[in-house]
Image (tube, rainbow, N blue to C red):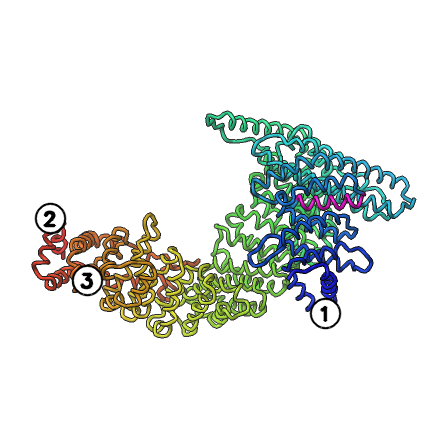
Amino acid sequence: MALSASDVQTVYSLLSNALCSDENLRKPAEAALAQCENRPGFCSCLLEIIAARDLACREDVRLLASVYFKNSISRYWRHRRDSPGISNEEKIHLRKKLLSHIREENTQIANQLAVLLSKIARIDYPKEWPELFSFLVQQLQSADMLASHRIFMVLFRTLKELSTKRLISDQRTFSEIASHLFEYTWTLWKSDVQTILQNFSALLQCINMNSSAEQQNDLLLMCERWLLCLKIIRRLIISGHPSDTTSAQEVRQVKEVSPVLLSAIQSFLPYYSSSLEGQIKLCDFMKRACTKLMKVLVALQCKHPYSFGDQTVLPAVLDFCLKKITNPEPAISSFEQFLIQCMVLIKSVLECKEYKPTLTGRVIDGSGESLSLDQRKKSIAMAVGDIINTVLPSEGIILLCNILIRRYFIYTAKDLDEWYQSPEYFHHEQDMIQWTEKLRPCAEALYIVLFENYRHLLGPVVVSILHEAMNCCPPLEIEITPGMLLKDAVYSAAGHAYYELSSYLIFNEWFHGSLSIELANDHPNMRIIHRKIALILGQWVSEIKGETRKLVYCALIKLLQDNDIAVRLAACRSLCYLVQDTNFSEEDFFELLPTCWSLCFNLMEDVQEFDSKVQVLNLISVLIEHVGEKIAPFASQLADFFHKIWEESTGESLLQIQLLAALRNFVFSLGYQSSICYNVLLPILQKGIDIDNPDALNLLEDSILLWEATLSNAASIVPQLLDFFPYLVAITERSFDHLKVCDQVAVSIIEDYVISGGIGFLNRHASSLAKLLDVIVGNVNDKGLLSTLPVIDILVQCFPVEAPPLICGVLQKLILICLSGEDDCNPSRTAVRISAGAILARVLVMNTNYLAQLTSEPSLSIALQQAGLSVNQNVLLCLVDVWIDKIDNATAIQRKICALALSIILTLRVPQVIDKLDDILSVCTSVILGGGRELSEEDPSGDATSSSGPHNESHGYGGFASKEFRKRQIKDSDPIRQLSLEDVLRENLKACAAFHGDASFNAAISRIHPSAFAQLQQALKMA
């Protein structure tokens, strides 16, 4: 039922109650509002409340109404099948009334109205609302300051929304909007700049004179409108024109706007350092204005680099930014956000690929247009290169490098205080913070790009600063002096540029001559240098060679004992890098393992942050993986640690995921000794694979991987592991998605149970196994089937009598796959059909009576009909056609299985068999004559179902056979390999002749081509 004007007061009351702190009033009101959301007229009622500005209407209720209105637009403005939504008549009313109430005095409500107008425009403009922009521009002509500010707020939100639409038609529409709006907005912006500057100048001249509150508010509104105009101009140029990188065509607006923006920055900056006592909002505007202007210049350079690289733009902007970085005014040096944007712009210019000279030759394709485009790009790149070389000559590059290291890399007193107050938080903040958010990370990012571009020039410079710092701050220094801070800074520079700097600095000499001595200095103030050395050892890992490597291991182990958490965490990370390095030496590190484990365990206890715990766990996991079987002496100690951390991390699923990964490496490293940690491992594993566990959604995937690792490294399937199998069935029944994510792993788990569990597993979990295989075969794609079918084949091989009746539903599905005939031009489907056919052939060979019974089951006939498969003959004879047709696509063992099955078919008392005698004998002959060689060449252990881990070898530890070795034994003992196809065929031909009579049999034999018959005779005479 639709809402009308008479319901406005009711909706107002509901909104008012929804803001009430009393739950007895709030919850029913929220429920009633939720029911009203999709009713026609609801948005109209909300708009009436928003538009009401009398004293009786509360501001907070109006604001809540605007929020509900905005949400309703998102949900119901478009037509939906499950809801009548908002009618076209109501939409027209809403659009018209919204535009008439743009001049909203409450800023929060005005912002909500701007957002919801933009959402409507995204859907309705231009088809349903073509007059939107013309109306807004018309209103601007006669608007007062507040109204014009609100209109620009709507314009900004709407343009931002429309610019995100990606269809070509939408982008073309936005370009048209940009062409109409740009000149007006740009003219107004330039006018406002002058007005704002005049007002600021007047304020400075009569700072002690009290201006009226109304004048100040108008000035602030103008400032905010000016900022909105700036954002709109940025949006119009960035989104209203395709990037000039594709066409190398000049974007006129970039050349027009950029110099004016730079001039505005230069005009505003002096006011940053001026004294505007009591004018906090105006000071805040000044900071935002200067920063935003620089951000717009950065955006223009990134979007339209060729236009920005013009002689009228780039030199002045680049020179300005360089001067502000290298020689800022005293007040500007504390204006971090502005300096960051200056660095971002220089970095963007230096790493811009469009400004790099092309290294490829010209390609002439017959059209002069593409050649002309390449020439234009090359010409612009050369011109920009000349500009950069002029503005930033060699001495300028060296100066910038020096300034970055000596001024911006240096820790401030605030940095050191933050470190002292919270070392752990300080360590992670250096990693997690975006480089564009703080000055030092931004300076480091600029330095890295600068060094990459001018490595040959800056390599000796950095080494020179390094030697200077080492002389100013000797290794035994204990005071935090400027020399120590400079050493820390240049160590940072050396770490960031390790790859390029290695040609100028020999690490071994640096380590022995300075770093190792500094590490021996245990004074607390040396934590600054110690942390940086710890990071350097991880960054320079590729240059640590020979005997130095062991000394570095020892150094990092020592740093793990430091009193400062930040130092220990830095050492933890670098040690992880060294262990993962290809030159990691197990021999050198083995004697350090006991100490390393203890220090890691202690660090885990001392840290509080999640990221710290993950970092320590990662080191432990990496160590376990790379040490391998040598982990055994520490197994008990590690198991206790894992148990303790698991218990302490209850409810912290992200940390437990890391723990599960570490446990998996632990199991792989222990190999067939992993049973010594089952008292800890199995309870953890059981919680992870139990879908009723509250954290199952987060832990299940990693738990399945750990489960597979545990099984594949088990010397035998212990009873508790055997009890886990039904969990796999529960997982597939709850959500097959988990199995799809870990399809290979799930199949490998089944295979482990079949191979290692034996008849005991089959007797205990027969129904669960049948259900699981039925679900998998019925749901996975061809890739999943190719992983699953080998496991079914092993199951039938190991239990030829027990397994086929158990998996009758699966075998029926395999028959449907074989008879589907959908493998034309599809290699995967062909492989699936022949693998399925080979399994059915094996059943026929090893349990002949059962397959004959299965193919005559009524349920199979029903399944065939439901699948739309028309079968006009005995199903076994249809399978004969598949075995004959696909024999060339089969592996050697599959060929022999199919040939044996075909020879057994000869004994069936079916008259049609005699008609297929020629084809059957042809297949058998080819397998006999080529089978022995092919079988000997085929790798009996090759299989795609097992998931190999870090230490998955052919033989286990302590004399236990590995999973792969057990699989090979099973395949080598395959009865199919032992059977003689020649003997079987010879005997079955006699049975065929006896059943069909000599006359019919000899007539069929006579139809065989003489050469084929000769090959048959040759094959049957082979011993």
Kindly report the distance in space between the C-alpha atoms of the residues bearing marks 1 and 2.
Answer: 98 Å
Q: Can residue 75 be seen in this view?
A: no
Q: Is mark 2 on a helix, strand or loop?
A: helix
Give the magenta-colored segment's residue range: 144-159
Q: Which amino acid does label 1 sit on?
A: Leu
Left or right position of 873 against 747:
left
Tell me the kind of residue under disc 3: Ile
Mark 1 neighbour class, 10 Å CA radius: few under 14, some 14 to 19, many 20 or more: some
In this orientation, which residue lies closer to the viewer: 640 or 768? Answer: 768
Spatial separation of the CA atoms under disc 1 and disc 3: 81 Å
Q: In this orientation, does residue 145 appear?
A: yes
Q: Distance between the residues labelled 2 and 3?
A: 24 Å
To which quarter of the image does residue 974 belong?
Answer: bottom left
Q: Nearer the viewer, mark 1 or mark 3?
A: 1
Q: Is residue 1019 left or right of residue 40?
A: left
Say the numbered circle drawn on residue 346: none
Indicate the position of residue 29 as horizontal and vertical percent values. 69, 66
Q: Where is residue 615 in the image (x, y as percent from the top left)?
A: 58, 58
Tag 3 secondary structure: helix
What residue sits right under mark 3 in the picture?
Answer: 904
Label 2 sits on residue: 1010
